[in-house]
Amino acid sequence: MGEFKKLVFSGVQPTGNLHLGNYLGAIRKFVALQDGNDCIYCVVDLHSITAQLVHEDLRGQIRSIAAAFIASGIDPEKHIVFNQSAVPQHAELAWIFNCVARIGWMNRMTQFKDKAGKDRENASLGLLAYPSLMAADILVYRGTHVPVGDDQKQHLELARDIAMKFNLDYQDHIRRAGHGTDITVGDEPVHAYFPMVEPLIDGPAPRVMSLRDGTKKMSKSDPSDLSRINLMDDEDAISKKIRKAKTDPDGLPSELEGLKGRPEADNLVGIYAALADKTKAQVLAEFGGQQFSVFKPALIDLSVQVLSPITAEMRRLMDDTSHIDAILRNGGERARARAEATMKDVRDIIGFLY
């Protein structure tokens, strides 16, 4: 075999309302990556029960994420859109990876420490093993590239560690089974079954912060709805939230250096840049020296212009969910076929009878 075929995989958890941070930090990238790439986009519903076991309307949340994918411009016929629980091979490979990964690796994951808090003993085993399932999500399709935010980079590094350990531990089996690909990791040649996954982190706003506190990430779990712009917000709500967004008394600087130590100003400029497909420097060249009383109305107009068509299409899709359900069903069938091809190889490499 030659080198691994490029495949982009990513997923979004169905927990609560999607917001501007999800759109700019993830979904918009998904849309852009469609051109020239083979893409698989997943609603990762198995992950959603790691921290919160019981959800009142999990099916509705799954459909909402899928609706956001479609409304934003993802083509579910050229690419695959599905929900994770429809493909049991994710969980099967995750168990194998649980046996490959080391407990020490999991204990070092900063997201587990953050989410478990001081009461680590009471956190679910699923929360600790979450990165192992994430690795399986990607590698069950032998994905090569994942668009991620900075907060997920550590999990992606773990996915690489798991893939490498599997490749090295089973190297002889992989060669005997004839399923491998010769790759070089660093200076070392490896006959690998799983690729070394690469992160895709770029764009002017990979991380969108709270409108009420520029040092905190925009989050659906924030008790204040004013802290985020939800994808289902109407024009009035968007306008109100941007007008009330926290700023400082100074005007906008003309140079990037002037945003240092001003997290709220930096955040709003970053949002404008991402929505306009510009750099922060270009935004400051246009608005430098002006007050927020001038900049905020411009940001409101741009936000409404970009988000209103998506909101309208999401509402239409959610009013009659039969179309979304059909997309997820079709995507699940296509994803299962691909995942099962991988798992047949993996069972063969390990030595399972099936």
Image (spheres, grey):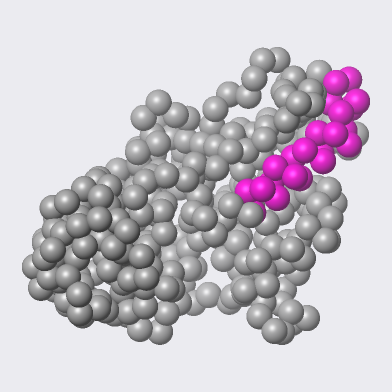
Q: Would you place residue 50 above or below residue 274 in this image? A: below
Q: Quadrant of the C terminus?
A: top right
Residue 313 x %, y %: 23, 54
178 left or right of 252 in image = right
Residue 100 x %, y %: 83, 48
Is residue 59 rendered magenta in the image?
Answer: no
The image quadrant that residue 122 belongs to is bottom right
Residue at left offset 70%, top offset 84%: 118
Residue 170 x %, y %: 87, 33
Nearer to us in this view, 350 or 224: 224
Q: Quadrant of the N terminus?
A: top right
Q: Would you place residue 301 above or below residue 248 in this image? A: above
Give the number of marks: 0
Is residue 174 rendered magenta in the image?
Answer: yes
The image quadrant that residue 79 belongs to is top left
| Extent of the magenta region | 155-176
Residue at left offset 66%, top offset 40%: 139
Nearer to us in this view, 95 or 168: 168
Nearer to us in this view, 240 or 204: 204
Main secondary structure type of the part rendered in magenta: helix
Residue at left offset 30%, top offset 43%: 73
Residue at left offset 67%, top offset 15%: 2
Can residue 75 be seen in this snapshot?
yes
97 left or right of 8 in image = right
Residue 271 x %, y %: 28, 59
Can residue 219 be seen in this snapshot?
no
The image quadrant that residue 210 belongs to is bottom left
Q: Would you place residue 278 above or below residue 53 in this image? A: above
Nearer to us in this view, 223 or 136: 223
